[in-house]
Image: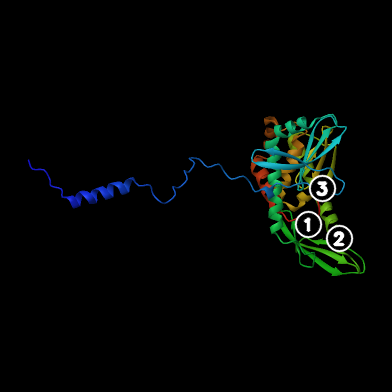
Amino acid sequence: MRSAKVDGQQLELFAQEFFAALKPSDKPAAPAQPLFKAPPPAPRHLIPTPPVASGDAPLKRIVLGPHTVDYALRRSARRSIGFMIDDDGLRVTAPRRCTQADIDSAIRAKQRWILSKLLERGERRANRQQCPPLEWKDGARLPYLGGEITLRLEDAARSHCQFDTAGGELWIGVVPGLSEWQLKERVKLWFQAEAKRLFRERLDFFAPQLGVRYAAFGLSSAGTRWGSCTSAGSIRLSWRLIHYAPALVDYVVVHELAHLREMNHSPRFWAAVGEVYPDYDGARLALKKRAQEMPVLFAE
């Protein structure tokens, strides 16, 4: 058997290729990629921060997961720690005897709810900032019962307000010297009157279906807390619901009436809601989505 003959030139070429393969590359090695990537934290600007006026106490700060939350703290004679979240962020009211550690623990115990509401408010505010502000002039379009009506302004010796149902037009008599804030107040009063009429009608319609009776009814100006109900049977509904579709108004009405049977959000409560409003989950999500899209007409 004859072996293959390798001459010196071939051997030298082989050696060059061999040692070149062993030589470290001049290019920097790519960093190792993590197997799983954590989702990026929400932008900081989406979490609203309460404004601080001259003379106010400085804001407190707490880190909740990937988020840093600045909040306003107020001491009072109340017996428990309370939380309030609006478009300006988180406000905490605590008894004077509570330590800062007690307050931090209470916040962390509810951090899932707090972060959810803060991010919801921040997203809502960001969406609204992208919408051009309403111009209060003849022809402006106003949200009403899930659709739109047209604002009509006409010169008049005496102020008046009349709604043309067929044409979907709200006519306002503009007297000399009428300012924009007075015009807005006149339109707001009309919306509130419409809300009071409609909400009472829907309360009286659904109460017998749930087998309950409410003792009193009033309007609130809340921006996202659409309703409330006390154990004494007093119901309050935000007049701003008049901007939303009738089906969403009905959901909030049924929700508050159901509290007259169950003053909680237990499975029995939702079962009561479902007796007359089966798609309460869909309505709840739709109301949340529409609230983020709704332009701000009046200060909350």
Q: Please tell me which of labels 2 and 3 falls first in the chain.
A: 3
Residue 200 x/y as whole percent: 81, 45
Q: Is residue 79 above or below residue 242?
A: above
150, 12: nearer the viewer: 12
Viewer-side label of 3, 1: 3
Q: Is residue 163 visible?
A: yes
SS state under label 2: helix
Q: Residue at x 72, y 62 (%)?
A: 132
Q: Residues within 10 Å of mark 3 (few under 14, many from 20)?
A: few
32, 213: nearer the viewer: 32
Q: Residue at x 73, y 31 (%)?
A: 105
Amino acid type, callout 3: Val
Residue 217 x/y as whole percent: 84, 41
Amino acid type, callout 1: Leu
All told, the count of numbered labels is: 3
Q: Quadrant of residue 213?
A: top right
Residue linked to disc 2? 181
52, 119: nearer the viewer: 52
Residue 231 x/y as whole percent: 82, 32
Give the distance between the C-alpha atoms of the residues marked 3 and 1, in whole angstroms. Answer: 25 Å
Q: Please tell me which of labels 3 and 1 falls first in the chain.
A: 3
Q: Is residue 274 above or below residue 192?
A: above
Q: Residues within 10 Å of mark 2 (few under 14, many from 20)?
A: few
Amino acid type, callout 2: Trp
Residue 48 x/y as whole percent: 73, 47
Q: Quadrant of residue 135?
A: bottom right
Question: What colour scheme governs how the chains and residues are painted in the rendered image of this protein?
Answer: rainbow
Q: Is residue 166 visible?
A: no
Disc marking residue 297: 1
Q: Please tell me which of labels 2 and 1 falls first in the chain.
A: 2
Disc marking residue 52: 3
